[in-house]
Image (cartoon, rainbow, N blue to C red):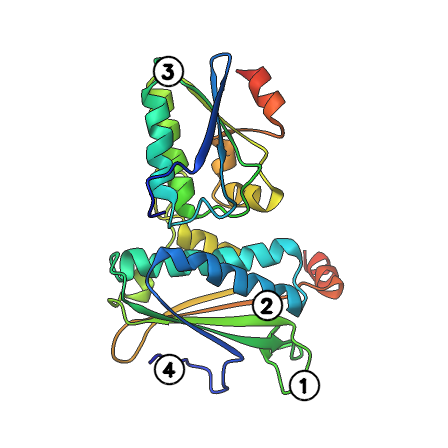
Amino acid sequence: MASGESRLRVQKENDVTQVEFVDRNILDEANIQQIGDEISALIDAEADPKILINFSNVDHLSSAALGTLITLNTKVKGKGGELRLTNIDPQIYEVFVITKLNRLFQIYDTAEQALGAF
Amino acid sequence: MGNGSNNGTPHIELRLLSQPRYLCGARQMVSAIAKRIGFGDLECSQIALAVDEALANIMKHGYEGRPDGPIWLRVWPISGSGDESRCSDAEEGEPARGLRIIIEDEAQQVDPSKIQSRDLAEIRPGGLGVHIIRHVMDECRYEKRRRKGMRLTLEKCVVTMADEGDEQIEA
């Protein structure tokens, strides 16, 4: 993504920061650096970050995006917080399974379930 | 100009420069072709993902982020051909049962034996792309091109009800 415009929709509910993506092809090699930087800044802004990333508007996830998620998860845990993922399309979830990262991340079917588990 | 190892003329040929903004178009093209060949939604997604990962690796590692490196992506239909091989080149007019995709570049060459996926027990960013490609495709073969650059051959065949039955018997 060449522009400095945010590609995220962010809202805070109670103490949970919810992140959604603006366009469907957002998590490929062309955008992932900016996305990672933006979510990282959200983590920096919280003392005890509780982050919920919603994949409902995403139809592709690259290994580069998985790498970014691993980095973000490490950062959140380093601050004693929690990162959760939700609304992952079955075809995208398969990428987590192939790489065995479904065992690392806390993944929920719906945002309500994820919010209830914080 | 790349020169694929296939003798036949590719049915589809795409040349792109090593810029990540074109990944989206390549994914969509390959996915749409796979759908037309008869792959299911999950398999279309897998093929598009494999192509995406392969192209992204070339851009990031092969060309090291250089934006002007040429990449050729060529597609052939393949079909079942008896017992010895599940898939082979489709004859003219023969229904396709799968896809062969050859991706070539003029980037730095790498010993194909060194192109391996990493141990998934290590939780760290990077090194997952090759694992994903090998996992989702039936065939994944890296070669050095004669003068410069690399060639990656990917193949995947449509899984039919008969194939699933054979696999259950073999299991």
Q: Which is more foreground, mark 2 or mark 4?
A: 2
Q: CA distance from mark 2 to mark 3?
A: 46 Å
Task: Say which residue label 2 marks.
Answer: B33
Q: CA distance from mark 1 to mark 3?
A: 62 Å
Q: Which is more foreground, mark 2 or mark 1?
A: 2
Q: Secondary structure at mark 4?
A: loop
Q: Is residue B108 left or right of residue B129?
A: left
Residues marked 4 and 3 touching at CB (< 8 Å): no
Q: Is residue A74 above or below residue A63?
A: above
Q: Identify the disc placed on residue B40.
A: none
**Residue in view at x 42 percent, y 47 percent:** A63
Instruction: Name the kind of residue labelled 4 in the image.
Output: Asn
Instruction: Name the kind of residue labelled 2 in the image.
Output: Ile
Task: Say which residue label 3 marks.
Answer: A80
The x, y position of residue A114, in whole percent, is 57, 22
Task: Say which residue label 1 marks.
Answer: B93
**Residue in view at x 39 percent, y 28 percent:** A73
Q: Is residue B44 above or below residue B120?
A: below
Task: Say which residue label 4 marks.
Answer: B3
Of residues A98 and A6, the one nearer the viewer is A6
The x, y position of residue B24, in whole percent, is 46, 56
Q: Is residue A10 visible?
A: yes
Of residues B82 and A5, the one nearer the viewer is A5
